[in-house]
Image: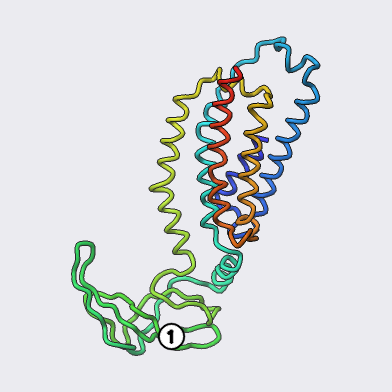
Amino acid sequence: MVVSAVGAVGCSVAGVSAYPPLVPEVALAGVSALCAVGWVVASYRVRGKGHLDAPPRKARPDSRVLPYLFAFGVPVSTVAAFLLLFTPSAERGRWEERMEAAGYGQYTVPVVRLAGKPEYVPEGEDNDPYYLSDVVVRVPFRDGAREVTVEEYSTAPEPPAPGTQLEVYYAPGASDGPVSEHDRVDGDTTFLTWMSVIFVWPWVIIAGCCMKSYMEVSDLARMRRFQPVIHLPALGILLAGVVLLLPVALEFPVAGYDRLPAFLGAFAPTLALTWAAKASWRVY
């Protein structure tokens, strides 16, 4: 159960599936859910037969892994669920794959003429002075060269002129694709990756360290033995979270929404752990 859940979270964080359907993630989450249900059924079948109710014959050593698994697993799984909100649609994903297969990248092309008067942008607190110009460039697509207008191309210290060589992004094998100054295919993904590295993952580590400082090994060891009042509601919360993630993972809207259920489902790991912690104190 734990290995399958960790695998599903790892696939989501690593971006194994570029766009829906997220088959590996959903399959691993389903296996984890089946294992959890199997654990509950097996626990009920042996309850009252002495195995779970009687003290163990040998003292089981406390697991040193559990505090780290709960402390860091909950924030990481929450972030993994939030990452699904930024998963591109299947249509967008297939378009990006087609552009990449057509050789999308940065190339140098000549300016044929200006398509308007350059606009001067003065120096500011965050920028040096530059010009924004609409330019017509000659793009050598594989099926023949074409003239394409690139709007608001930024240059400094002078505006471009006919014959100037400019760097633009386009796919040589896809004449219907975009031609632009900035990356239109991988730009958003790169931005989100750096934003998560700088602003998200440090807080995940901080949250994990804080949660670890409040977790005692002996307290978590008690939670390993099945207790319906503890584990059944926690399991229900986690399964509800998985169900809420399915609309965006498999790309089928529910009542016109797919991202909103995924946003709500991202809180399931935290709610399940909160319930298990509060219920365990009442039981033990």
Q: Quadrant of the N terminus?
A: top right
Position of 91 relative to 164 (above/below): above
Counting every numbered tag in the picture gives: 1
Q: Nearer the viewer, residue 16 or 22?
A: 22
Residue at point 38% right, 86% down? 136
Residue 29 drawn at (x, y percent):
66, 44
Q: Residue at point 46% right, 24% down?
A: 214
- SS for tag 1? strand
According to the picture, the residue beneath numbered tag 1 turns out to be 148
In depth, the one of 97 and 76 nearer the eye is 76
Name the colouring of the figure.
rainbow
**Looking at the picture, how far across and down is residue 129, in whole percent?**
20, 71
Q: Is residue 255 left or right of residue 126?
A: right
Residue found 47% across the figure and 75% down from its top: 170
User: Residue 24: x percent and y percent?
Assistant: 66, 50
Q: Nearer the viewer, residue 8 or 174?
A: 8
Three-letter residue code for mark 1: Val
| In the image, residue 38 above or below residue 14 | above
- For residue 214, above or below residue 197: above
